[in-house]
Amino acid sequence: MQSMRAARSECAGYSWFDRSACVNCAGKRRARYPLPMRVVSLLPSATELLLAVDGCDLLVGRSHECDFPAEIAGVPVLTRARTHGGSSSAIDADVSAALATGASLYELDEALLAELDPDVILTQNLCEVCSIDLRSVERVAARLPKPPTILSLDPKSVFDVFDDVLRVGQAVGRGSAGEAAMVSLRARYWSAIDFVNPFVPGPEVLFLEWCDPPFVGGHWTPALIEAAGGRHSLNAAGAKSRRVTPEEILAAAPERVVLCPCGFALDRVREDLATLEKTRWWPLLPAILDAKPGTIALVDGNQMFNRPGPRLVDAFEWLVGWLDGREEIIPHNFPVQYLPLH
C-alpha cells in the first residue's frame, strides 16, 4: 500500500492527455521508467491495482465508476450506464430485463477511446452487471487504429487478487512495483489471520450483497468470512453471488449480518435497511432477536468487499476485527456503521 500512497501524493497534477507523464514528477518518472505507456482502466478495482503498482502517471482514461483516489477525478470518463437509478428492486428489474435481451448494461465512448490512444486496457470478465463486459470492450478495441493490449481480470479469491497485482504490474511495465505491492498485501492478510482463533466456532454470517431482492455474497467473500473465523453457509467460496429466499436465510440462522450492497455508499445502505426492516423475516433473525450491539454492520459497498483490489485487504482486516473482537486491527476510518439495537 505504500506505493499507492506515494502515487497519490506525487501525481495530483498529471496531464492526462500528455504522453510525457505527470507534470509534477515527469523527470523522476522518465528516469525510473523510460518508456511510459498509456493505460485505460474500465474497472474501479483495476484502477486501484494500477495505482498500487506505481502506475498513476500511466492512467489516461477511466470508467464512470472509477472514483478512488480523489486525484483521478480529472481523468477522462469513457463509460456510462444504460440503466437508471431508483430503488434496489427497480434497479434489479432493469438489470434483469437488459440481460435477458443480451444487451450490455454500459456504453463505451469509442471516439474518446481512439483519441486517448491507449496501449493497454484493463477490464474484466467477472460480472457483466458491475462493469462493462469483455465482449463489448473487445469489439470496440478491435476497431481502433492501433488495437491495444486488453488485460481482463477475473478473480475468484483474494489470492487471485494478489496475482492480479502482479499481472497488472507486468502488463504496464511496472513489474518490480507490482511484486512489492503484492508482498505487502499478502503480509497484511496473513498478519490479520494471526488474530483468528481456529479452535472456537465462529458465528454464522449473512452477507447481503444486494438487499431487494436479497443476494448473498459470492466470489471471494465467503472465503474471506471463513478465513476471518465466521461461517457463510448460504454460498460457497468462489461461487457467484446468488439470490436467496427468506426461508433460506431463516434456516441459516445468522448471528451476524453485513449489509454491503454492490455500488452503494452508506446513505443508500441505510435506505435498504429501512426496506429490510419492513419485511416479515428480518425481525426473526437471531442477529436481531439476540439484540447484541454491533451484530448488524452497514458497510460502504461502493468501496469495500465488492471491489477486488488492494482495499479488499482493508475489508478483511475489518472483518477479522469485527468477528474476533480485535478492534486494534480495523483500518482507520473504515466505512462502516453498526446498527444500534435496543
Image: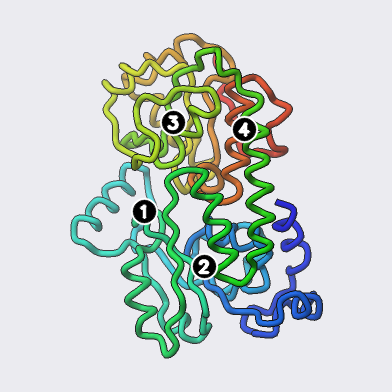
| Residue at the top extreme of this rendering | 290
Instruction: In the rendered view, tell whether residue 259 sits above or below residue 246.
Output: below
Q: Amino acid at mark 3?
A: Phe
Q: Are marks 1 and 3 in contact (CB under 8 Å)?
A: no
In the image, 279 versus 317, the foreground residue is 317
At horizontal 36% and vertical 65% (from top left) the residue drawn is 134
Secondary element at image label 2 = strand
Which kind of residue does numbered mark 2 sit on?
Ser
Residue 41's tag is 2
Q: What residue sits right under mark 1 in the picture?
A: 127
Q: Decide which of 41, 3 is in the foreground and name it.
A: 3
Q: Quadrant of residue 7?
A: bottom right
Q: CA distance from mark 2 to mark 1?
A: 16 Å
Q: Earlier in the sequence, mark 2 or mark 1?
A: 2
State the CA–CA distance, disc 1 to disc 3.
18 Å
Amino acid at the residue labelled 1: Cys
Mark 1 / mark 4, whichever is N-terminal: 1
Mark closest to the chain's N terminus, 4 or 3: 3
Q: Which residue is mark 3?
A: 207
